């Protein structure tokens, strides 16, 4: 081959840590060769916005040193307030005139100035046939936020080949591992600051929204109710989640925070149904560091009446055991879905 292969890394900039993953594609499929996770201080990334660009760049540099990768190109994902994903219905039209029309449509649906946003669209295939209308997924990000991501990532010496949406990367990782299922399936990545909530149907993303609840909601509630520091509150939460002995108040704060977090998540299930003509989710998969919060996932299942399964992002991904020993793999499993979905983006492409 004479063309160069641009192999990429996945880079997930989260609220509590930066994750970096390198996949190698071979005859037997994908292998995870390198992985790094670097915690970041609270406040550097908030609601999907990079607040402290220099601080995040430093964390990315540290992740690169840890991973010892030679790759220079990355796919990263935006989320939260920096990006909006919305399904709209518009009159059926030729694909080549859609882009222009989309801009007008976006003006009605997107609360940003259309001249200051990057806009993309995906026509939903499952909805393509028949009818006078077609469904289109609009993805809009304020250019200012896109530039901030670019600037922050590229200051570490990397080149951004792809700026994705975290929820889409989650769906990508799911599809790679589980294939295209016949059920309408929700994917919940319950992180620290956010829960990425995505619904897939026959291999297509039909809904994506980031809900502003996650592990930090618990830490912050423990901090407020018990008057302990954020770091202590975080440690108490983790101990409680691992079944260790903690003051009774920790468990009662977690239980009451569960109620409000579950309410928020149930609202998303209901919002999905209300905006999709009553379509019902048949199953949901969970991932993210906060799936270990005692009682949380079970309560979401109870409140929605929908069964769940814990997603395994490595179901069909091999690992290089020398670089990633089994106990380390077990630790990163709930944290890796988005970064793997990003790392899968262009693996092997020219
Ligand atoms: N054993 C555990 N028990 C309870 N919570 C945990 C445990 N391990 C990690 N967490 C929580 O998971 C969160 C980190 O998960 P994750 O790495 O998925 O989030 P993130 O990607 O940094 O954040 P976000 O996706 O919200 O931007 C933290 O809030 C952390 O407290
Ligand atoms: Mg995350």
Image (cartoon, rainbow, N blue to C red):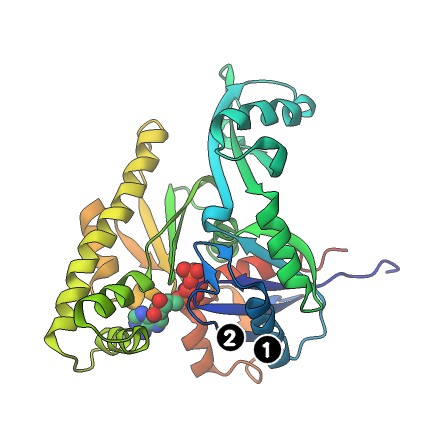
Residue at x 21% of width, y 75% of height: 240
Marks 1,2: beta carbons within 8 A: yes
Relative depth, front residue between 51 and 334 = 51
Is residue 250 toward the left or the right of residue 132 in the image?
left
- The quadrant in which residue 271 appears is top left
- Residue beneath label 2, please? 38
- Residue beneath label 1, please? 62
Element at label 2 = strand
Is residue 161 toward the left or the right of residue 138 in the image?
right
Q: Could you tell me which quadrant the N terminus lies in?
A: bottom right
- The quadrant in which residue 103 appears is top right
N-terminal label among 1 and 2: 2
Query: How far across and down, in percent of the image, does residue 210 sit?
Result: 41, 48
Residue at x 28% of width, y 37% of height: 270
Query: How far across and down, in percent of the image, does residue 185 sit?
Result: 38, 45
Q: Could you tell me which quadrant the C terminus lies in?
A: bottom right
Q: Is residue 79 visible?
A: yes
- The quadrant in which residue 248 appears is bottom left
Dot 1: within a 10 Å radius of its alpha carbon, few (fewer than 14), some, or many (20 or more) residues? some
Relative depth, front residue between 239 and 314 = 239
Query: How far across and down, in percent of the image, does residue 339 sit?
Result: 53, 62
Dot 2: within a 10 Å radius of its alpha carbon, few (fewer than 14), some, or many (20 or more) residues? some
Label 1 beta carbon within 8 A of ligand 1 = no
Query: How far across and down, in percent of the image, does residue 330 sit?
Result: 41, 76
Relative depth, front residue between 68 and 49 = 49
Pick out the residue farthest to the right. 2
Residue at x 68% of width, y 66% of height: 155
Element at label 1 = helix
For marks 1 and 2, give the CA distance. 7 Å
Residue at x 58% of width, y 63% of height: 53
Q: Is residue 8 visible?
A: no
Pick out the residue farthest to the top. 132
């Amino acid at each position: 081959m004479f063309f160069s292969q641009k192999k990429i890394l996945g880079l997930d900039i989260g609220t509590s840590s930066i994750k970096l993953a390198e996949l190698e594609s071979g005859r037997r499929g994908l292998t995870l060769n390198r992985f790094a996770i670097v915690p970041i201080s609270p406040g550097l990334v908030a609601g999907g916005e990079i607040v402290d660009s220099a601080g995040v760049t430093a964390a990315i540099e540290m992740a690169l040193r840890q991973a010892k990768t030679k790759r220079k190109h990355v796919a990263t994902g935006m989320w939260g307030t920096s990006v909006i994903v919305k399904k709209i219905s518009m009159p059926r039209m030729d694909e080549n005139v859609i882009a222009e029309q989309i801009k007008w449509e976006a003006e009605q649906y997107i609360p940003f100035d259309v001249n200051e946003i990057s806009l993309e669209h995906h026509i939903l295939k499952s909805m393509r046939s028949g009818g006078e209308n077609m469904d289109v997924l609009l993805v809009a990000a304020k250019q200012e936020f896109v530039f901030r991501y670019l600037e922050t990532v590229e200051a570490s010496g990397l080149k951004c080949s792809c700026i994705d949406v975290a929820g889409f990367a989650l769906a990508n990782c799911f599809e790679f591992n589980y294939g295209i299922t016949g059920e309408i399936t929700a994917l919940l990545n319950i992180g620290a600051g956010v829960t990425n909530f995505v619904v897939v149907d026959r291999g297509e993303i039909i809904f994506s929204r980031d809900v502003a609840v996650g592990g930090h909601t618990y830490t912050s509630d423990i901090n407020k109710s018990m008057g302990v520091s954020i770091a202590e509150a975080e440690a108490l939460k983790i101990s409680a989640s691992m079944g260790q002995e903690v003051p009774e108040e920790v468990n009662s704060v977690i239980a009451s925070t569960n109620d409000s977090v579950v309410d928020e998540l149930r609202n998303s299930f209901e919002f999905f149904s209300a905006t999709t003509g009553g379509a019902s989710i048949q199953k949901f998969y969970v991932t993210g560091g906060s799936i270990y919060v005692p009682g949380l996932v079970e309560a979401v299942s109870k409140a929605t009446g929908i069964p769940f399964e814990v997603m395994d992002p490595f179901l069909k991904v091999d690992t290089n055991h020398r670089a990633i020993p089994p106990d380390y793999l077990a630790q990163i499993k709930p944290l890796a879905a988005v970064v793997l979905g990003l790392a899968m983006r262009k693996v092997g492409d020219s």
